[in-house]
Image (spheres, rainbow, N blue to C red):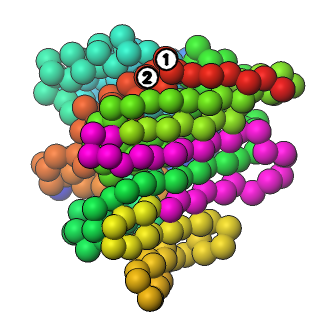
Amino acid sequence: MEKLKCYVVGAGFMGTTHLDYYVTNPFVNVLGIVDSDQGRGKTVAAKYKIKWYPDLDTAFTCDRANFCDICLPSAFHCQAVVKALENGADVVCEKPMAVSLDDVRAIKEAQKNSPGRLMIAHVCRFMPQYYVTKQLLDSGTLGAPVSLVISRESETPAWSYHDWLFDRKLSGGTLMDLSIHDLDISNWFFGMPSYHALELCGNNAKKGADFTLSVLGYPNGVQSTIIANHLLQDGHPFATSFRLTCMDATVEYNTVYAKDAIRIYRKGSDELIDISSKPGFSDGYAHELEVFVNCIKDGVDFPISVDEAGLAVETVHRLYDNMHINMV
């Protein structure tokens, strides 16, 4: 088949991460990198031997694309996604869908009026520790869910372009940038939350980075407790873990103690499920983009709906509406 033509929008860390995958995919032809920073855009274009464009209007004037990959700071997702959809392209956009609820609504409206389709790249759904657990939960073999305790912690990020992650207007803060991974997983497991509460601890020495503890309640009685932390010291390894308690079993995962397996505890026994050979274990981003490209190629629905991605953003806003702040 003819290769799928694409533009990658955003020449930063995530844009080049996605480019690394596309240039190895035999079904994809990268037409160019789109970035308003000429110096950075041309540097990336030279590295990957592709063209640089200052904006999507210029790019689409030169050549049509089957899809666009949006890797801009979160506050700029809406404008780029809408522009790509208006040009009839399919779109994959880094999480979150947007920072504001108005932008979420604008993106949903653009999607309705475009032949192009949209997938928001909630990468954890493509990692086996999460999708295997989701399969077990849906199978009913764990019994009814009771609670989820999940955490995601890292050193304060220093890689964002001009430190955009520390500007809450651009990133939505640690809750929107980091915790949204696990907020989305919780909603994926249990549905739409009916209760929201947030404790946020900020550090005046590290503005824009927080420790957050979120509690979500669901109509079926399940409760999720979700920790996100951007305040670990420089050099501290990234760490994430979860414990899903159900009536008949408990499922655990921890990157520090057993990165390559999930453990299931049942009455009187426990079992390790090796996930090291499953798709997405070594590179969730590559698996996510492979699924996206295959969905376009095969004409099937994307695995993450626009409504699900919008719910993740809405959940962040509901938590901010029910927040208690501590500063140190």
Please say if 17 is above or below 284. above
- Who is closer to the viewer here, 321 or 262? 321
Question: Which region is colored magenta?
Answer: 218-243
For the residue marked with disc 2, what is the amino acid?
Arg
Could you tell me if residue 141 is visible in this image?
yes
Task: Determine the image quadrant of residue 259.
Answer: bottom right
Residue in front for this viewpoint, 102 or 318: 318
Q: Residue at x 24, y 21 (%)?
A: 108
Residue 246 image label: none
Observer-nearest of 241 and 78: 241
Instruction: Give the alpha-carbon distance from disc 1 to disc 2, as whole Å.
Output: 5 Å
In contact (CB < 8 Å): disc 1 and disc 2: yes
Q: Residue at x 43, y 38 (%)?
A: 216
**Residue 75 on image: x %, y %:** 50, 18
Instruction: Say what amino acid the circle numbered 1 marks.
Output: Asp
- Above or below residue 164? Residue 305 is below
Which residue does the image show at 66% across and 73% down from the upper left? 257
Left or right relative to 72: residue 31: left
308 to the left or right of 96? left
Measuring from the top left, give residue 90's x and y in whole percent: 25, 34
Q: For mark 1, give the secondary structure.
A: helix
Residue 321's label in the rendered image is 1
Image point 42% across, 46% down: which residue? Answer: 223
- Residue beneath disc 2: 318
- Circle 2 residues within 10 Å: few <14, some 14–19, many ≥20: some
Residue 24, position as x, y percentages in the image = 44, 58
Asked which quadrant contains residue 211, the reply is top right
Q: Looking at the rendering, in which quadrant would you find the N terminus?
A: bottom left
Q: Is residue 144 above or below residue 100?
A: below
Circle count: 2
**Magenta span includes 219:** yes
